[in-house]
Image (spheres, rainbow, N blue to C red):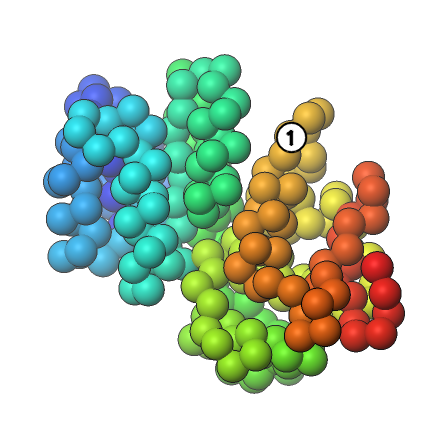
């Protein structure tokens, strides 16, 4: 039974979500504020977190930052709840490592569907013949069984979404991977008009990977079409 931590100061909302999630086979724990939420994350074991942006004390963004800064929780799936129409909250959340977002008010059925989607995506991905095999492209090594990524021998802290995005690209080096495919694989839906989820995720991944040893870019954007992982000597 997947265990979900809901960090939100609205007790009525928690009770509603608990009933919906229970019907879908989830168990839920409630944290009323940021301090309670961080304590439960440090001392408990959760499959995913539903995190409200507006919390008393430390806001949801700071909690997200703390979660991602801890190696133990770097790949913990997180869905953020934002005020309706606050697009900047969504952009900031994705840049900081959230796996998905949902604006309030929302349909509880949509939330459960999104939680199921990020949990499916959180299952360690198979690369090659075995999920325990090591994938290497030039100076990047990916071990899917341990969720470890090394760049020039240095370990990089990637979220599950970042890891999945990188894997799709390095599995097809020198070839364009379409935006449609990436949206459906990473977010479980096609790209909505003016949606920037993939672009924010890509920006974060590029920043963490850094340039190639020769100073060239690793990932090329094919305008309006998709992205390509470049091999040395292929140019940009």
For the point 72% across and 73% down, the residue is 214
Question: Is residue 22 at all visible to an observer of this figure?
Answer: no
**Relative side of 202 to 43, left or right:** right
Residue 233 lies, with reference to residue 13, above or below; the image says below
Q: Secondary structure at mark 1?
A: loop
Other residues around mark 1 within 10 Å, as few (<14) / some (14–19) / many (≥20): few
Q: Is residue 216 above or below residue 99?
A: below
Q: Residue at x 39, y 35 (%)?
A: 80
Residue in view at x 13 percent, y 40 percent: 36
Task: Please name the residue shown 36% across and 40% down the image.
Answer: 24
Residue 81 lies, in percent from the top left, at: 38, 29
User: How many numbered circles does the render carry?
Assistant: 1
- The foreground one among 57 and 215 is 215
Image position, residue 212 (x, y; %): 68, 70
Q: Quadrant of residue 211?
A: bottom right
Q: Position of residue 53 (x, y in %)?
A: 33, 29
Quarter of the image that includes the N terminus: bottom left
- Identify the residue at the far right of this view: 234
Name the image quarter holding the C terminus.
bottom right
The residue nearer to you, when weighing 236 against 52, is 236
Q: Left or right? Give the position of 180 relative to 158.
A: right
Q: Is residue 172 left or right of residue 70?
A: right
Residue 88 visible (yes or no): yes
Q: Which residue is mark 1?
A: 195
* Residue 107 position by quadrant: top left
Check the image and name the residue furthest to the front. 215
Left/right of residue 199 with respect to residue 57 in the rendered view: right
The spot of residue 35 in percent (x, y) is 14, 40
């Amino acid at each position: 039974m997947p265990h979900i931590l809901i960090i939100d100061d609205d007790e009525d909302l928690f009770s509603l979500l608990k009933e919906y999630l229970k019907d879908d086979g989830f168990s839920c724990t409630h944290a009323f504020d940021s301090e309670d939420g961080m304590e439960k994350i440090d001392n408990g074991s959760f499959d995913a977190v539903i995190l409200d942006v507006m919390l008393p004390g430390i806001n949801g963004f700071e909690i997200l930052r703390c979660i991602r800064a801890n190696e133990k929780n770097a790949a913990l799936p997180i869905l953020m709840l934002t005020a309706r129409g606050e697009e900047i909250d969504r952009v900031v959340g994705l840049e900081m490592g959230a796996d998905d977002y949902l604006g309030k008010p929302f349909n509880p059925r949509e939330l459960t569907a999104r939680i199921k989607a990020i949990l499916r995506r959180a299952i360690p991905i198979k690369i090659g013949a075995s999920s325990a095999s090591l994938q290497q492209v030039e100076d990047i090594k990916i071990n899917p069984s341990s969720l470890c990524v090394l760049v020039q021998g240095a370990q990089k802290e990637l979220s599950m979404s970042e890891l999945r995005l990188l894997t799709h690209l390095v599995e097809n080096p020198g070839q364009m991977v379409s935006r449609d495919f990436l949206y459906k694989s990473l977010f479980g839906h096609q790209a909505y008009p003016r949606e920037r989820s993939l672009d924010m995720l890509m920006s974060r991944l590029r920043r963490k990977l850094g340039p190639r040893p020769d100073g060239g870019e690793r990932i090329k954007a094919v305008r309006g079409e998709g992205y390509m992982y470049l091999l040395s000597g292929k140019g940009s």
